[in-house]
Image: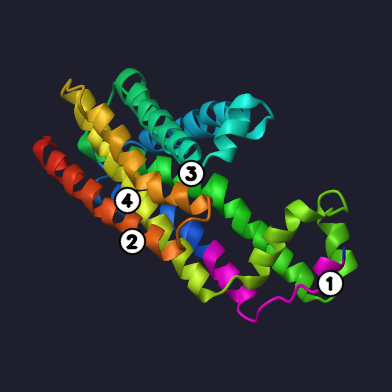
Amino acid sequence: MSAFENIVIGKSSIPSLIITVILMIAIPVLFFLYWRNRYKQQTRISWLLVGAVGFLVSVRVLELGVHYFCIIADNPVSRFINANAAAFVLYGITMAGVFEECGRHVILKYVMKKNRTRENAVLYGIGHGGIEILAVLLPSMITYLMVAVLFSRGDTENALRTLNITEETAAAVLPSVQAAAAFDYGMMAMNVIERLFAMLLHIGLTVIVYYGVVNAKKIYLPMAILLHMLMDTFPAIYQRGLVPLWVVEVWVAAWTVVVLFLAMKLYGKMKR
């Protein structure tokens, strides 16, 4: 596995990854502490926990199950989607929008019937976005950090053995090792900013869906799905290597503003 012998860990890789891991933990914790401290009487911890569980069930169980058939498994459907950029993007944004927003809607309407306050809706969004960081993204960053530390020692064979990288898995793992080696402060900033946008989007979309539930207005669920799909469009295109990362960040920032503007208007309409 000579390709791994040429891996050079950048000077900023390990410190930037350490800071990224710390900030990934800090983002949801600080969001929660701020909101809970400000609205302790109007919020219940159960809404935070249910928001987290809602994400895990709707995305990491149900949506991932569909992905296994449509993307991961080898069948005519997966071959068509993976071979066609337009189909891949349309499939990805549709699944993300439908599963996350319908999951939110079902839980907010049929499960969380007590303590319905606009402040709890925000807390639900913090739980939803927070667990995405802690359960999905944080483990990846910790893995990158471990890879960077192991390869920085100069003992490639020990690093490969510790990470259980074999001849069969080398080709699939090499891009991740290269990404860890190239990680720097710029990438750290990108990851942290992207997570801040994502947290705000999750909160905003939760408020939109919640408003539709408590006011019995069906239009807000498809609105949230459409907004989610639009927000995910360029990230999905980026996965196909068709646009640079900065375009994705600008796109997500723009839709964050749109979603927050709408959510704040609806939040203001709801009585405390």
Earlier in the chain: of badge 1 and badge 3, it is 1
Amino acid at pointer 2: Val
Residue 272 horizontal side relative to residue 159, left or right? left
Mark closer to the observer (1, 3) = 1
Give me the C-alpha separation between circle 4 and circle 3: 14 Å
What colour scheme has been applied to the protein in the rendered image? rainbow
Amino acid at pointer 3: Ile
Which label was assigned to residue 5?
Answer: 1
For this rendering, which residue is in front, 132 or 246? 246
Q: Which residue is mark 2?
A: 250
Which label was assigned to residue 131?
Answer: 3
Mark closer to the observer (3, 2) = 2
**Which residue of the protein is positioned furthest toward the top in this rendering?**
110
Earlier in the chain: of badge 4 and badge 1, it is 1
- Whether the magenta-drawn stretch holds residue 164 is answered as no
Give me the C-alpha separation between circle 3 and circle 2: 24 Å
Q: Quadrant of the C terminus?
A: top left
Earlier in the chain: of badge 3 and badge 2, it is 3
Residue located 48% across and 44% down the image = 131
Amino acid at pointer 4: Leu
Using a 10 Å C-alpha cutoff, classify the residue at mark 2 as few (fewer than 14 neighbours), some (14 to 19) or many (20 or more). Answer: few
Residue located 63% across and 32% down the image = 79
Using a 10 Å C-alpha cutoff, classify the residue at mark 1 as few (fewer than 14 neighbours), some (14 to 19) or many (20 or more). Answer: few
